[in-house]
Amino acid sequence: MLPLLLGPLGVEAITQHAFESDAASGPVRLHETMQQARRLVGPVNADFGAVFDRSAERLYLIDELGREIPTPTALLLFLQLLGWAGRQGKVAVPLNVTSQVERLAARPARDRPYAGRARRPDP
């Protein structure tokens, strides 16, 4: 399904184990899938790799060298992408997210890629 969605955007997608079996699940299966994706990124000369958990609720990113991109870094990269696309507005973030999000949003408009502000929920 993912290649069908990404193709019209001009994104080449190479999938491995696109349909997960019920034989293995949970952390063990996710760990194996991450290892396979790390090994695949380099040989296919991919710009990055992406792994979804079994329920497709979480996205794990892998850089071009096969290293996992930590979730806080992925959030900051996403905010930069929004800014480079010219998006403005508010973004809600969980209490436990890195304070870099607020620093990114607080920079002067000419210096920040995301023109908006971050707000954490009240504890």
Image (cartoon, rainbow, N blue to C red):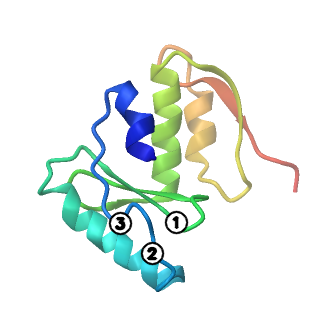
- In the displayed structure, 24 sits above or below 81; it is below
Q: Which mark is residue 109?
A: none
Q: Earlier in the sequence, mark 3 or mark 2?
A: 3
Q: CA distance from mark 2 to mark 1?
A: 6 Å
Q: Position of residue 115 (x, y in %)?
A: 60, 20
Q: What residue is rendered at 60% in x and 64% in y? A: 55
Q: What residue is rendered at 40% in x and 78% in y? A: 31
Q: Which residue is mark 1?
A: 53
Residue type at the position of mark 1: Asp
Q: Is residue 97 left or right of residue 69?
A: right
Q: Which residue is mark 2?
A: 30
Q: Residues within 10 Å of mark 1 (few under 14, many from 20)?
A: some
Q: CA distance from mark 3 to mark 2?
A: 12 Å
Q: Which residue is mark 3?
A: 17
Q: Earlier in the sequence, mark 3 or mark 1?
A: 3
In this view, the mark in front (3 or 1): 3
Residue type at the position of mark 2: Leu
Front-most of residues 26 and 81: 26
Q: Is residue 16 left or right of residue 84?
A: left
Q: Residues within 10 Å of mark 3 (few under 14, many from 20)?
A: few
